[in-house]
Image (tube, grey):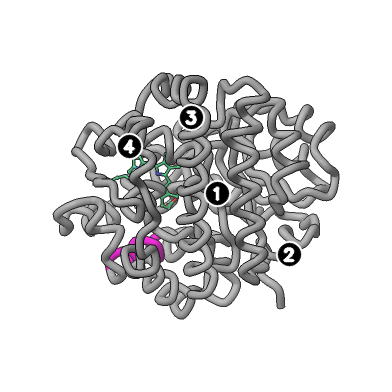
């Protein structure tokens, strides 16, 4: 009996789409907050296989989602390039800002050792999950990870990263290759530990001129897919170039990705008309509709399910669930989908 998510990723369209939610392990769950409170730092939490396994399983126990995404963070990879990463409560991630001149000194370290605890979490999950639940591993895409490394944290417009592309294109290309190479080793480790699907989060794929999108998003993503395939990893890979708009199409055609996660800003009809018919699609409920709940949530869920009927579709949000979402709204969503 094949798991529903794996069926969809193999190209089947199911009457009721399988469902999981981005950031499903998180602060909207009291049981998550309680484990989080027992940790000294967010990074230490991500690298604690016992706690990371526990919080990954929490939303599966509560809602019975079809997919279980490993609890970790896309900002662990900079550590494998020798960069410091820390999280400040109420502010988010912080890193030592990286300049173009710093890039020549970067090298990929012992990924399998530095992030070995994440491999252990995946192995724990592989043994613990119900037989119908698909285990999803993930990493950030090189461009998104690079923006955090260059900016030294989150930023509104990623100005320094965008400037570096134009001012120091060779250094930018080198940085993206280094991140891609570390990411390949990280994802190979996850797949070998039992991840059945891999997902690449490119949260900052928005607002890039097409030729730049090609260089910073498509080329490094293709490098990762080719690296995984060369290493014998056959798992489907879901790509999430958030905010890419019409650039979703060259992304779908050129990266070698097996499925696409759609953000909530993308026009559903455009996606159905323009993306390859046999490409599995995931998404794309507005997280604010989940926060709202009530009849508006039901209507929007119904619209999305009806639109994707007959196509291979996994139901998800268009971005992560927010900490203010009542648990009852998640139950409403799952109930509506399962009928
Ligand atoms: O989806 C899941 O449940 C799996 C775990 C997961 C986390 N982060 C846990 C997390 C995944 C897949 C991520 C991806 C991630 N991390 C992305 C890409 C997706 C996206 O949201 O665009 C990005 C950009 C990050 C970087 C990051 N991590 C930021 C900017 C922050 C701070 C903002 C925030 O929401 O607090 C984090 C922290 C983080 N990662 C939390 C969780 C559950 C909350 C931290 C906490 O518990 O204090």
Separation of residues labelled 2 and 3 (CA atoms): 29 Å
Give the labeled residue for mark 2: 7
Nearer-N-terminus badge (2/3): 2
Give the labeled residue for mark 3: 288
Mark 3 CB lies closer than 8 A to ligand 1: no
For numbered disc 2, what is the local secondary structure? Answer: helix
Give the labeled residue for mark 4: 102
**Magenta stretch: includes residue 313:** no
Quarter of the picture holding the N terminus: bottom right
Nearer-N-terminus badge (3/4): 4
User: Which residue occupies 67% across, 60% down?
Assistant: 236
Separation of residues labelled 3 and 4 (CA atoms): 40 Å
Q: Position of residue 37 (x, y in %)?
A: 17, 53
Density class for disc 3 (Cα within 10 Å; few <14, some 14-19, many ≥20) is: some
User: Which residue occupies 61% across, 59% down?
Assistant: 227
Density class for disc 2 (Cα within 10 Å; few <14, some 14-19, many ≥20) is: some
Q: Position of residue 310 (x, y in %)?
A: 84, 48
Dominant secondary-structure state across the stretch colored magenta: helix
Quarter of image, ligand 1: top left
């Amino acid at each position: 009996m094949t798991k529903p998510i794996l069926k969809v990723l193999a190209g089947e369209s199911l009457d009721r789409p399988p469902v999981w939610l981005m950031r499903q392990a998180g602060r909207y769950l009291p049981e998550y907050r309680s484990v989080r409170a027992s940790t000294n730092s967010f990074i230490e939490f991500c690298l604690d296989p016992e706690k990371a396994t526990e919080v990954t399983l929490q939303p599966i126990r509560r809602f019975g989602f079809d997919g279980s995404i490993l609890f970790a963070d896309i900002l662990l990879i900079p550590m494998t390039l020798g960069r410091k990463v820390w999280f400040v409560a109420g502010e988010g991630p912080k890193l030592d800002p990286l300049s173009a001149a710093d890039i020549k000194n970067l090298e990929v370290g012992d990924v399998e050792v530095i992030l070995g605890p994440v491999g252990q979490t995946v192995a724990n999950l592989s043994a613990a999950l119900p037989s119908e639940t698909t285990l999803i591993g993930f990493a950030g895409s090189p461009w998104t990870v690079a923006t955090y490394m260059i900016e030294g944290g989150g930023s509104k417009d990623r100005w320094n990263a965008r400037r570096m592309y134009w001012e120091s294109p060779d250094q930018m290309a080198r940085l993206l290759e280094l991140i891609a190479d570390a990411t390949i080793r990280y994802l190979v480790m996850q797949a070998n530990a039992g991840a059945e699907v891999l997902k690449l989060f490119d949260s900052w794929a928005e607002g890039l001129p097409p030729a730049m999108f090609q260089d910073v998003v498509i080329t490094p993503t293709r490098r990762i897919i080719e690296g995984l395939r060369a290493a014998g990893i056959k798992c489907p890979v879901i790509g999430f170039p958030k905010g890419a708009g019409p650039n979703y199409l060259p992304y779908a055609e050129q990266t070698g990705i097996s499925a696409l996660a759609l953000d909530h800003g993308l026009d559903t009809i455009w996606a159905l008309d323009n993306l390859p018919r046999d490409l599995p699609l995931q998404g794309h409920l507005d997280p604010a509709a989940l926060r709202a709940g009530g009849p508006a949530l039901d209507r929007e869920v119904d619209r999305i399910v009806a639109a994707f009927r007959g196509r291979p579709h996994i139901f998800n949000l268009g971005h992560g669930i927010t900490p203010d979402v009542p648990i009852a709204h998640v139950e409403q969503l799952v109930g509506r989908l399962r009928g």
